[in-house]
Image (cartoon, rainbow, N blue to C red):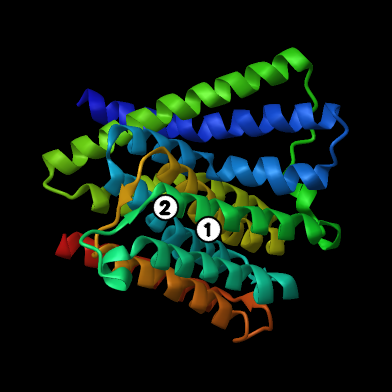
Amino acid sequence: MLVYILFIIGLIFLIKGADFLVDGASSIARRLNISDLAIGLTVVAFGTSTPELFVNIVASIKGNTDIAIGNVIGSNIANVFLILGLSSSIYQFAGTKGTVWKEIPFSLLAAIVLFITANDQLLDGAQTSALTRVDGLVLLSFFIIFIYYTFSIAARIDGMDAHVSAKQSGWLRSSLYIILGLAGLTLGGKWIVDGAVALATQFGMSEALVGLTIVAVGTSLPELATSAVAAYKRNADIAVGNVVGSNIFNIFFVLGISAGIKPLPFQPGYNLDMGVVVVSSLLLFLFMFTGKKRSLDRWEGVILLICYGGFVAYHVFTD
């Protein structure tokens, strides 16, 4: 029972830890005269993906590699099908030309690169498949390219500072926020991994299923909150960009760091889930051209939600 209580507390610590980290880092960045735009593109973007990162670091160190890979793949699926589906079924989302023609295809590229680097058995005839440390470096190299692209378009993005806290605290308080944030993320990540393993053991579920569903949704809560606030403030492109950017971040940075810590065995069964990641990106791209141009209509949001329900149902009944 205690491990399940810690699992729930871990989720709270994870979300609040990311929040404290963003507030503290944003405040220090402001004191160093770094622009809101630069903060939004780096600190806030990093903040929404720190739950996935810390859960994966703990899972990699403890050898729970199915949770590490399942968390990222499941989070990416949840980000599009669940978060954008839920948000756009309430508020219509619109995307800029850059989001449609560059960032969404880049997220599709991320899924394809992951498929190629992880499928040694299928593509190279190796006995096993894994994300090696070399693969991790390849993923991190793509992440650097994405960061360069992000800053190159920074001057053309409106409303990016909408998610940057206006608070500017003193050095001591800001540092305390960062320390508390990192502590919350570390403890939360450990308790979530421990809880996920306990859930899998007690209910006869695979660690992959727990990672793809429960852990993935839990670590995607910051993206849900950010997208909901962006939609409410009518900064719809930021909402779409947050989800798409998070998906790119999760594959190139989170899995890149995870594989660098410890090679991650890749089970052939993940290829089906990778296919779902690709389909989700293609559907998002397609929906930008149906109905109102470059927008996600409510009926399209409902379709995305149905797709997520089908994905979860399939895994629950076939695990």
| Camera-nearest residue between 144 and 1 | 144
Residue pushed farthest bottom?
A: 290
The quarter of the picture where residue 239 lies is bottom right
Res. 150 image quadrant: bottom right
Residue 310 visible from this viewpoint: no
Give the x, y percent position of residue 305: 42, 68
Badge count: 2
From the viewer's perspective, is 317 left or right of 137?
left
- For disc 1, the neighbor class at 10 Å (few under 14, some 14 to 19, many from 20) is many
Say the numbered circle drawn on residue 247: 1
Residue 299 horizontal/vertical position (percent) = 51, 78
Tag 2 residue? 72
- For badge 1, the amino acid type reads Asn
Q: Nearer the viewer, residue 167 or 281?
A: 281
Q: What element carries label 2?
A: helix
Q: Position of residue 287 (x, y in %)?
A: 56, 80
Residue 313 bears which disc, if any? none
- Determine the residue positioned at 41% across, 38% down: 261
Residue drawn where x is 53% and y is 58% of the image? 247
Image height of 108 relative to 146, above or below: below
| Residue 195 % position (x, y) | 27, 34
Position of residue 265 in the picture relative to residue 306 (left or right): left
